[in-house]
Image: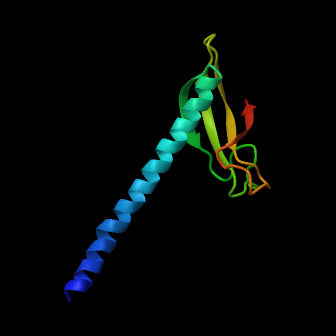
Amino acid sequence: MANKNLIILVMLVGIPLASYIVFSWGEKYWKKRIDDWAAKRGYLLLEYRAAAFFEGPSKWGRTENQTVFRVKVREKNGNIREGWIVFGKKWNPLSRPDELTEERWD
């Protein structure tokens, strides 16, 4: 009976906790990647968000090898730009999924 209660406790606490840790790590990882991308180009990152499957340059046809973000940046001259950045290649599963492959500005 005690083992059954322990299993239930692990399922109720452990699984959500592990999910939270993995999700948080992913958020921090992509935030750093996008901050690095912006800094390398001399931009100040104002906003970013992951694109839904029906948004962005490869909408409806995005593969699991691609991650797309909507970004808003300030250039050194003060101009504000919005657009999409794509990490990973659509049809090359051997490519690095964190490799920037496209920038598309509005």
Q: Single out the residue that lies furthest toward the right.
A: 91
Could you say where residue 46 lies in the image, as x and y percent from the top left?
53, 26
Q: How many marks?
A: 0
Q: Residue furthest bottom?
A: 1
State the image quarter where residue 14 is shown. Answer: bottom left
Seen in the image, is 6 located left or right of residue 32?
A: left
| Horizontal arrangement in the rendering, residue 29 relative to residue 69 (left or right) | left
Q: Nearer the viewer, residue 74 or 15?
A: 15
Identify the image quadrant of the C terminus. Answer: top right
* Residue 74 point in image, percent of width and height: 59, 20
In this view, 48 is above or below 40: below
Front-lying residue, 73 or 95: 95
Q: Residue at x 28, y 78 (%)?
A: 8
Q: How is the image coloured?
A: rainbow
The quadrant where residue 33 appears = top right
Residue at image coords 60%, 12%: 78
- Which of the image's four quarters has the N terminus? bottom left
Q: Residue at x 62, y 31 (%)?
A: 37
Residue 38 placement (x, y as % from top left): 60, 27
Viewer-nearest residue: 105 or 23 = 23
- Quadrant hosting residue 15: bottom left
- Report the side of 8 relative to 49 (left or right): left
The single residue placed furthest to the top in the displayed view is: 77
Relative height, residue 80 to residue 65 (above, below): above
Q: Residue furthest left?
A: 2
82 lies above or below 42: below
Residue at horizontal 74 percent and vertical 34 percent from the top: 104
